[in-house]
Image: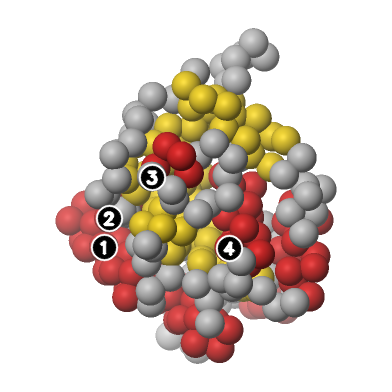
């Protein structure tokens, strides 16, 4: 079974959509179109009955809704119909007492019984939040944005790969088709999430005004696909893939 992305011109390149129940990585620099892709993917599924969850770990969810609502994706209506949900796990926005307290009690102090505000959530916390939404709202599609805001151990490369693989396998066990968005400034560098994910799509910002934005399907397990860059533009309904660059 395939989960259609709703991205015009893309599903044809991957045999009709993303194999369901797997985890995919969207990698690229800020502003390259990854969040728009994620919201198009969720709204398309929700329009056909597949409830979606957007886990935001940095951007304010209200701002994200406002930005995406400029496209003809019917997002406000889908939110009212409870077909799309947001889980805002970003840092607290207001400065206050805890910030003053941390000036005199360090995070490592035995006197501090509380987790430090502003620390990135662990992979297990993010997974538990997703799992709760899946159980309560019959979620079928998930977007996590950005992956870089989740705290993984970096004591050594092997341990980091194991933690990433554990996070991905737990997501796969939920049965949802999940997109992990990674704001990596150098998308061509290979990291542990590239190995763990079932598919990897790179987003390229143009080097000049004369070039098109493009995406590149680097990896898609079990699916024949082109590896050349595919130019795209932002149209009325979001991303539209134009073809080989």
Residue at numbered disc 1: 165
Q: Residue 207 lies in what quarter of the image?
A: top right
Query: Where the N terminus falls, by quadrant?
Result: bottom left
Residue at numbered disc 2: 196
Query: What is the spatial separation of the Cα atoms under label 3 and label 2, in whole angstroms?
Result: 22 Å
Tell me if residue 48 comes above or below residue 70 in the rendering.
below
Residue at numbered disc 4: 45
Residue 35 visible in the snapshot: no
* Secondary-structure class at tag 3: loop
Label located before the other in sequence (1 or 2):
1
Residue at the top extreme?
A: 210
Residue at the left extreme?
A: 158
Residue at numbered disc 3: 15
Query: What is the spatial separation of the Cα atoms under label 1 and label 3, in whole angstroms?
Result: 26 Å
Query: What is the spatial separation of the Cα atoms under label 4 and label 2, in whole angstroms?
Result: 24 Å
Query: What is the spatial separation of the Cα atoms under label 3 and label 4, in whole angstroms?
Result: 17 Å
Point 70% across, 78% down: residue? 82
Mark 3 vs mark 4: in front = 3
Query: What is the spatial separation of the Cα atoms under label 1 and label 4, in whole angstroms?
Result: 26 Å
Q: In front: 152, or 208?
A: 208
Point 35% across, 30% down: residue? 226
- Other residues around mark 1 within 10 Å, as few (<14) / some (14–19) / many (≥20): some
Label located before the other in sequence (1 or 4):
4
* Secondary-structure class at tag 2: helix
- Give left or right: position of 227 versus 233: left
């Amino acid at each position: 079974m395939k989960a259609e992305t709703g991205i015009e011109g893309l599903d044809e390149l991957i045999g009709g959509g993303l194999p369901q129940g797997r985890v995919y990585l969207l990698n690229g620099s800020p502003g390259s179109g990854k969040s728009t892709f994620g919201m198009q993917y969720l709204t398309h599924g929700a329009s056909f009955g597949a409830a979606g969850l957007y886990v935001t770990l940095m951007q304010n969810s209200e701002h994200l809704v406002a930005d995406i609502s400029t496209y003809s994706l019917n997002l406000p209506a889908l939110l009212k119909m409870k077909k799309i949900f947001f889980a805002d796990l970003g840092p607290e926005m207001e400065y206050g007492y805890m910030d003053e307290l941390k000036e005199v009690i360090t995070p490592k102090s035995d006197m501090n019984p509380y987790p430090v505000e502003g620390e990135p959530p662990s992979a297990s916390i993010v997974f538990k939040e997703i799992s709760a939404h899946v159980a309560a709202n019959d979620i079928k599609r998930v977007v996590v944005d950005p992956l870089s805001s989740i705290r993984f151990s970096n004591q050594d490369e092997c341990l980091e790969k194991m933690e990433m693989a554990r996070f991905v396998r737990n997501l796969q066990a939920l049965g949802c088709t999940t997109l992990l968005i990674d704001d990596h400034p150098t998308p061509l560098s290979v990291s542990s999430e590239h190995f763990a994910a079932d598919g990897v799509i790179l987003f390229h910002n143009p080097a000049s005004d004369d070039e098109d934005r493009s995406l590149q399907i680097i990896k898609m397990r079990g699916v024949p696909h082109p590896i050349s860059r595919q130019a795209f533009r932002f149209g009325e309904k979001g991303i539209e893939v134009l073809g080989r660059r």
